[in-house]
């Protein structure tokens, strides 16, 4: 039977859920669906053939793809575990029709529901996979749709699915940098942070990357700095920036640093 989902306390066939009612959407990322024996048609159309990107151009209501939750804008990534980039264009259609059961893997871009009016974005050309810069100038008229204006030529397109959009390069780069910073902070958690007078720590030698044991004497003369006493170089004192310090690991504290 048709796949079913629980909504508002009742079960509903997935194929009955339309974009203008309550769309059935998988989370962003990779997902797979099995084409079972007896399924003759997939109920979808692709925008191009391999070896280029294979985006879903349209989905037939009530067909296999619709029931499996495939949406226009999703990208076919693998056929039976084989990347579509390795599938020859000559045998592409035949393989989709003749092989059963058949596992198809798709990729859905990150949910783009956070676009706002006036934001710079990029829209995909389905038959080439090329991303073109554009500006979002209106949201709607239905959930999951917006209107864009292409930077090249000023062409306007209305009712564009958000699945076809991604953040502009600047936003993606900024988000990537923020993610790297968050990962580094989590990795260093427990070693970095504010220090206390008398605490054992380690200071980095900038030209070699080595960490030397030291003891924090107190706050430095300027914000963000600390006065330290090196434990391995004649007890010399120095003022260093906090970012060049880290807490001494527990295993190192067992050594004699006096």
Image: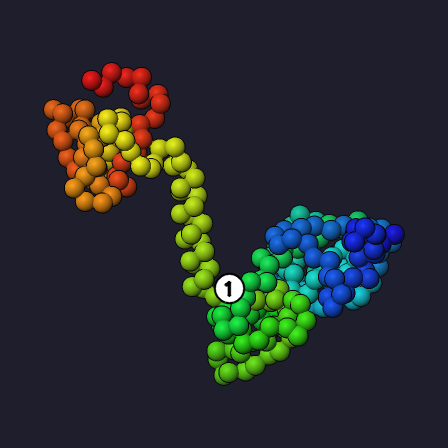
**Residue 207's spot in the image, x, y percent?**
20, 40
Q: Say left or right for 154 vs 92.
A: left
**Residue 35's spot in the image, x, y percent?**
79, 52
Which residue occupies 43% across, 46% down?
A: 182
Which residue occupies 68% across, 54% down?
A: 26
Q: Say left or right for 171 vs 60.
A: left
Along the line of sight, which residue is nearer the eye, 83 or 111? 111
Disc 1: which residue:
167
Q: Tell me if residue 220 comes above or below residue 254 in the rendering.
A: below
Which residue occupies 27% across, 31% down?
A: 196
- Number of disc labels: 1
Q: Tell me if residue 94 comes above or below residue 124 in the rendering.
A: above
Quarter placement of the C terminus: top left
Which residue occupies 78% across, 53% down?
A: 7
Along the line of sight, which residue is nearer the eye, 40 or 255? 255
Q: Tell me if residue 204 comes above or below residue 75 in the rendering.
A: above
Q: Is residue 180 visible?
A: yes
**Residue 88's spot in the image, x, y percent?**
65, 59
Along the line of sight, which residue is nearer the eye, 255 or 109? 255
């Amino acid at each position: 039977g048709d796949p079913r989902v629980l909504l508002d306390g009742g079960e509903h066939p997935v194929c009955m859920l339309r974009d203008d009612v309550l769309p059935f959407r998988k989370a962003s990322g990779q997902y797979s669906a099995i084409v079972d024996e007896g399924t003759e048609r997939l109920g979808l159309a692709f925008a191009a053939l391999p070896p280029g990107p294979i985006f879903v151009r349209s989905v037939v209501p009530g067909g296999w793809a619709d029931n499996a939750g495939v949406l226009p804008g999703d990208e076919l990534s693998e056929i039976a575990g084989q990347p579509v980039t390795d599938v020859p264009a000559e045998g592409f259609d035949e393989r989709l029709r003749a092989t059963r059961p058949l596992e198809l893997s798709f990729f859905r871009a990150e949910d783009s529901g956070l676009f706002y009016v006036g934001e710079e974005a990029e829209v995909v050309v389905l038959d080439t996979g090329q991303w073109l810069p554009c500006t979002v100038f209106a949201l709607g008229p239905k959930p999951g749709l917006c209107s864009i204006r292409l930077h090249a030529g000023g062409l306007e397109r209305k009712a564009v699915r958000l699945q076809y959009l991604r953040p502009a390069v600047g936003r993606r780069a900024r988000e990537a940098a923020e993610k790297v910073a968050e990962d580094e902070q989590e990795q260093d958690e427990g070693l970095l942070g504010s220090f206390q007078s008398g605490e054992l720590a380690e200071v980095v030698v900038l030209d070699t990357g080595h960490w030397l044991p030291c003891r924090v004497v107190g706050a430095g003369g300027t914000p963000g700095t600390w006065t330290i006493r090196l434990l391995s170089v004649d007890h010399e004192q120095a003022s260093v920036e906090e970012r060049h310090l880290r807490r001494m690991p527990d295993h190192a504290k067992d050594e004699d640093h006096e």
